[in-house]
Image (cartoon, rainbow, N blue to C red):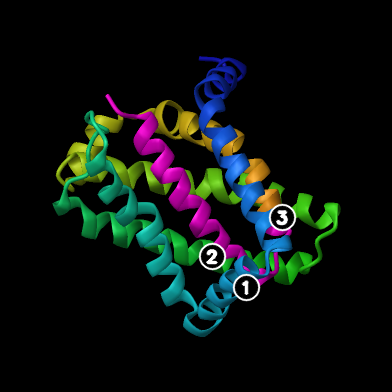
Amino acid sequence: MPLFAQLSRAFAANLVPAVFLWGFALALLLLYRSVEEVQGALDGVAQLKLRWGLIFAVLAQAVAAALLPFFFQKFQRGNHRKTRAAHLPFLMIGLGSIGATTSLFYDFQAQIFGVGGDFSTLLKKAALDMLVYTPLFCMPLVTWIFALKDHDFSPQKAKGALGKRWVFERTLPLYLGALIVWTPTVFVMYSLPLPLQFPFQAVVQCFWGLVLVVLTAE
């Protein structure tokens, strides 16, 4: 399928969850800027991130991307390609590890681009994030993590199921959806102070996971 056709299909498929995510991210930002209690709570989480470092990143991402969606799916009807309890340790380790690399990536961006909130800085960070880090690292790794989960943690079975064109047939559609859904949210995230960027990402990631559980019910 041509890239433009894939992009159009991804836009149509992800428009509804994208609107949910954009609204949630914007509401969270506005609450942080205007409500003292929300600002205090989020700043407290940011201080935990500073104290715990990568341990916080691993735990937060594991909970937000794996554990909470797993429990939430129990309240939903349908199949959801359900995650079983036996899958949880693997998913939490795999997705938590991505959380650690993402936290390091945010710190790296702050060093090379600074911590300003001007549009030029935000654009550079969002471009490197969504055009390099996400497609070349995150999406291929996520593809393999879930393929292994779905095929009894067998690399051979996962490789056979993905096929030789897995980058184009599995990862590219996943990335196009992420590009559409997450890009505006990334701009919001990078406008926040550095210690709050990863906690904000984790909260939004959790919301995104819960939305997907609802929307992918079969």
N-terminal-most mark, 3 or 1: 3
Q: At label 3, which amino acid type do we have? A: Lys
Spatial CA distance of label 2 from label 3 is 17 Å
Q: At label 1, which amino acid type do we have? A: Pro
Q: Residue at x 33, y 44 (%)?
A: 144
Task: Find numbered disc 1 in the image and state the secondary structure of the residue it sits on.
Answer: helix
How packed mark 1 is, by other alpha carbons closer than 10 Å (few <14, some 14-19, many 20 or more), is: many
Residue 51 image position (x, y, % from top left): 51, 85
Left or right side of 88 for 9 = right
Bounds of the magenta segment: 190-218
Residue 67 image position (x, y, % from top left): 30, 56
Residue 116 image position (x, y, % from top left): 81, 65
Residue 122, visible in the rendered structure: yes
Left or right side of 138 for 88 = left
Q: Nearer the viewer, residue 146 or 154?
A: 146
Residue receiving disc 1: 195
Q: Nearer the viewer, residue 52 or 152?
A: 52
Residue receiving disc 2: 199
Q: Residue at x 36, y 34 (%)?
A: 214
Residue 135 image position (x, y, % from top left): 54, 43
